[in-house]
Amino acid sequence: MSVLVEIKNLKKVYRTGDITFEALKDVSLDIQAGDFVAIMGPSGSGKSTLLHLMGGLDRPSTGLVTVKGVILNKMNETALAKFRRAHIGFIFQFFNLIDNLTIQANIELPALLQNRQDRKATRHRATSLMERLGILDQAQKHPWELSGGQQQRVAIARALINTPTLLLADEPTGNLDSTSGREVLNILQEFNAQGQTILMVTHDAAAAANAKQVIFIHDGRLVEQMPGNNVQRIAQYMIALTET
């Protein structure tokens, strides 16, 4: 496998008046193409900040974030927005769907923003994803008519509509019941098995165990990496971090 994401000496400092908070402290990390990585850590440890920097949603104070050979923090806002649409898909805990659009329109929107000319291909891709995710019969409904699990499936389809190089998921099961959460994790594993690179922030050891590797962050620093196949070991380490 080749390196898809390179993070070098990454720092992120937030300032509010006279108060300074260092969210990330000199983090360096490589993510291989085709990997499925879970990022774990206590609340406020910097895991979501790291994910947002990888996705170009925020800029580091110092250090570099490189995705597919492109240094994100050296791009201007217009170029960065185009790069995100073409190469990065986002799944959020609270779905972030547009209530006044149908399910199909929600899914198609990023593709239409990316390429307004090829509506036929966009419709075909959206239909294929909805069928694969088991929501094709919901295509003309609106988000508020669907269950949480169904809405997250819509969010996954929307994140995948542009065939992203990198899929970022921020607590994708955090707002779901256990059955729906298990279904979402199975979907992510299926796409990863077909080559999709996935980074997932989660607080749930059982969810993290679905990844190929787990990265732990504490107080803004990367403190441990381990395989994602041992839920008991992951849970024990997470408990130890929380108690530190």
Image (cartoon, helix red, strand yellow):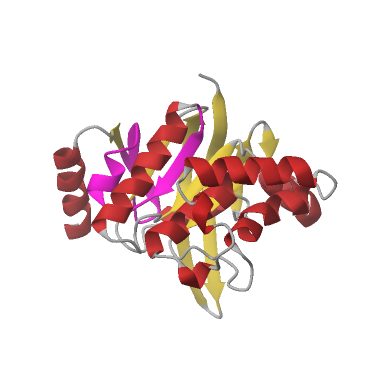
Residue at the image position 59 percent from the left and 53 percent from the top:
60
Q: Is residue 215 magenta?
A: yes
- Asked if residue 9 shows in the view, the reply is no
Highlighted magenta segment, given as a residue range = 195-224
Residue at the image position 24 percent from the left and 32 percent from the top:
229
The quadrant of the picture occupied by the C terminus is bottom left
Q: Vertically, is 127 above or below 203?
A: above
Foreground of the two, 192 or 242 = 192
Residue 120 location (% of width, % of height): 77, 43
As drawn, which residue projects farthest toward the bottom? 17
Residue 128 location (% of width, % of height): 58, 40
Foreground of the two, 156 or 232 = 156
Compared across the picture, whether 73 is left or right of 179 comes to right
Q: Vertically, is 5 above or below 144?
A: above
Residue 88 location (% of width, % of height): 61, 44
Compared across the picture, whether 159 is left or right of 19 comes to right
Q: Could you tell me how many numbered marks the image carries?
A: 0
- Asked if residue 66 shows in the view, the reply is yes
